[in-house]
Amino acid sequence: MKLRTPWSLTDVLTTLIALSPAIGALLLYNQLPDVLASHFSFDNTADGYMSKSGSIIMLVLLGLVPLVIRLARYMDPNRANYEKFSKAYEVTRIGTSLILAIAGWGMLLYNLNIRLQMNSVILGIIGLLLLVMGNFLTQVQPNYTFGIRTPWTLSNPEVWRKTHRFGGPMMMLGGASGLVAAWVDGVAGAVIFLTGLVISVVTPILYSFLLHRKLNQQ
């Protein structure tokens, strides 16, 4: 009989990666200012601040997101379907952990007077993640927590299948806009990314509605 452990190596690694900024903040506690820049505008200047303790709490909570994603899988009524798209699920968890780690470490370095182009870094890593996820999206089977979940995809397996086949390339389009935006300064870069992101999100939703209506009319 195969022994099943409660936590896999991926669980441990993704959690450690996502929590690494919080761990780093504790190790560098005395070197950090009492008030930390925590939010940045499109021109890479700080426009939001938090206390040092508040920032660490925020980093800890964000670091637990990969575990929340794991928990959501086992709470899903269709959790058995996850075995059919385990690669897509794990890529999402690992990618989310990397984004959280990069954003958290970028914030810490900024407050240690090591300036980075935060917007370029974040847009680039999000764009890359969306490109990879879009490639796997076609594999996702019906569930209630992962994928393009609209009333029309959830009510019809055929709508789910075709919407995810259509949504994969759309997500990759959103990812490409992020990579392009990472090289464009200021508001223009944000406009490029948000335009691509809106198109990649809205068009699959509209597609699922139109497809569902078409199938119901047959």
Image (cartoon, helix red, strand yellow):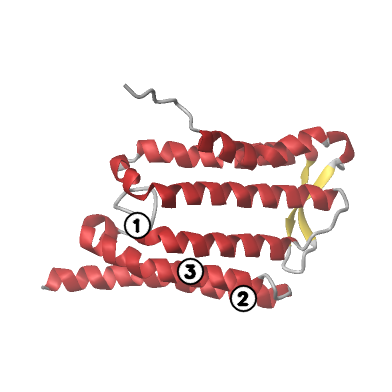
Q: Which residue is mark 3?
A: 172
Q: At which x and y percent is residue 126?
A: 59, 61
Q: What element does badge 3 sit on?
A: helix
For disc 1, the neighbor class at 10 Å (few under 14, some 14 to 19, many from 20) is some
Of residue 102 and residue 68, the one placed in the foreground of this image is 102
Q: What element does badge 2 sit on?
A: helix
Q: Give the mark, 2 or 1, whose residue is nearer the N terminus.
A: 1
Determine the residue positioned at 37% across, 36% down.
74
Q: Is residue 26 above or below residue 49?
A: above
Asked whether the beta carbons under mark 2 and mark 1 sit within 8 Å of each other, the answer is no
Q: Which mark is residue 148?
A: none
Of residue 67 and residue 205, the one placed in the foreground of this image is 67
Q: Which residue is mark 2?
A: 191
Image quadrant where residue 123 sits:
bottom right
Determine the residue positioned at 77% across, 59% down.
47
Q: Amino acid at mark 3?
A: Met
Quarter occupied by the N terminus: top left
Q: At which x and y percent is residue 113?
A: 88, 52
Q: What element does badge 1 sit on?
A: helix
Q: Is residue 135 left or right of residue 58?
A: left
Q: Which residue is mark 1?
A: 139
Image quadrant where residue 211 sits:
bottom left
Quarter occupied by the C terminus: bottom left
Q: Amino acid at mark 2?
A: Val
Q: Is residue 205 above or below residue 105?
A: below
For disc 2, the neighbor class at 10 Å (few under 14, some 14 to 19, many from 20) is some
Q: Give the mark, 3 or 1, whose residue is nearer the N terminus.
A: 1
Of residue 34 and residue 111, the one placed in the foreground of this image is 111
Q: Is residue 184 above or below residue 44?
A: below
Q: Which mark's residue is nearer the viewer, 2 or 1?
A: 1
